[in-house]
Amino acid sequence: MRQVISRDFGWYYLLLLAAMVCFCVFFIVTPAGQIRLGDPHSEPEHSKFSWLAMLFSAGMGIGLVFYGAAEPLSHFAVSAPASEVGSRQALEDALKYTFFHWGIHAWAAYGLVALAIAYFQFRKKESILLSVTLKPLLGKRAEGFIGTLVDSATIFATVVGVATSLGYGAIQINSGLHFLLQAPESQTVQMLIIAVTTVLFLLSAMSGVSRGVKLLSNLNVILALVLLVCVICAGPTVLILNNFVDSIGSYIQGFFRMSFRTAAYDAARNLWIQQWTIFYWAWWLSWTPFVGIFIARISKGRTIREFLVHVMLVPTLLTMLWFSAFGTLSIHLQTTGIELIDLDTENVLFGALAHCPFGFFLSILAVFLIFSFFITSADSAVFVLAMLSEHGALHPTNRTKLIWGVLLSVLAGSLLAAGGLDALQNVLIIVALPFSVAVVLMMIALYIELEHERNEMDLYIKPHTYPEKDKPFRSYEN
């Protein structure tokens, strides 16, 4: 089924993600960008650093560590996107396509869904549910069967996505411990890792967003920056920086071509696009419910323009620098005769760090970072699931968080034991297709509501009318 979707609906995913990027740019440059996510004069609840740290940690933090060294290496030495494996063109394309898969498109998908949820929650005084974003189109029917279906799909996608992430995170932590301490790579160790992290992420989640989640997210970004700087300094520094600058230029130059590339007359290239680009586009879409709700929850008080510019650009730039450092390191080692492509994906990072000065200590830092990202992803998910279970409550009870935390860990452990993580990942990709219909409707509804409010405020250069407190402008009530 996943192969059928990738083959027959790849064009649709490419158009949808491109449209989401265009929508974000449109909202940034139009007067609607001045509208605040909250009352007209409300202020942000979190500092900019903590806000960006939390959204980055929830969005893709652990994925960067998992694929940072492995994906660019794969595009160069295993399966090249548009040329022969190991060629000069494959070398140049390796980072460009990695930037493409993890850059603007991914964060536009997260940002647009998060914007819709935050706008209706804080500006329209609705609950923090995906279903309420459809009210401009569906009216009260958004609270009926259709709304229940959308919110149920949100819970399902969040559970499946986070359980998969927890399973793969446990595998990579186990790999790091094996490299550092010769701990056995076994399901028993991985289960123990899940058990320990469950206790820690539950403690974090139950302490609230402003305490445990924020503190851990800040720690994540600090650890990530330290590891990044160390790798840049310990690796081929000049090559990393040259590759970073050159690949940004290639990414910008090829942005539109890559965004619409299907390789319609080249079966081999088309298959690569299905296996990589279409997979990522479906993966990011399937994660938008969880990440979107969490980003929305922490974004009260920011203008739409500020929100979208920061969500789309800051994580993208950090992601580019990360892949430049770790990808250049792994490719450099491969071209100098050190065979990294024979390693499993979760081992490539540690295999590359082993050939750096102070590699043992860098690997210790990497394990701590994976562990920290692991906990942050889980506590964010527990918080989101608890909010959804209590009909969008901004401060869900600890009892609900505890239940969801235990269920997530049991599911991740069970699938890990049964070897079902890949199957669960496939299910999530399949779910992304029907969910994308809700995303399309959400985009239309958001445009309708923002245009309505802009007209009510007489907003062209500056607003002339503000909504009264607790009496927002709502098109679906007129």
Image (cartoon, rainbow, N blue to C red):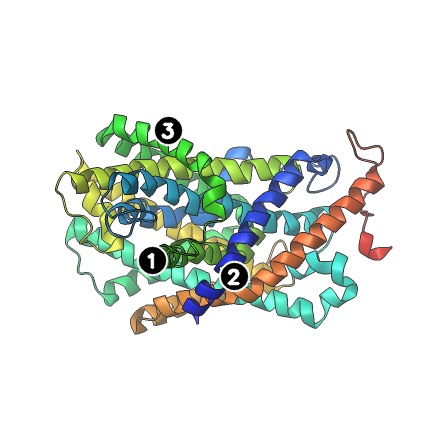
Q: Residue 26: horizontal and vertical position, in percent? A: 65, 40
Sequence-wise, the earlier of marks 1 and 2 is: 1
Question: On screen, 248 above or below 178?
Answer: above
Question: On screen, 236 above or below 396?
Answer: above
Q: CA distance from mark 2 to mark 3?
A: 44 Å
User: In the depicted view, which residue is nearer to us: 20 or 200?
Assistant: 20
Q: Secondary structure at mark 3?
A: helix
Q: Residue 240: horizontal and vertical position, in percent? A: 29, 31
Is 113 left, or right, of 52 in this rendering?
A: right
The mark tally for this picture is 3
The residue drawn where x is 63% and y is 45% is 23
Picture quadrant where residue 166 is located = bottom left
How packed mark 2 is, by other alpha carbons closer than 10 Å (few <14, some 14-19, many 20 or more), is many
Which amino acid type is marked by label 3?
Answer: Val
**Residue tagged 3:** 245
**Residue tagged 1:** 268
Tell me, for residue 401, which label it has, or none. Answer: 2
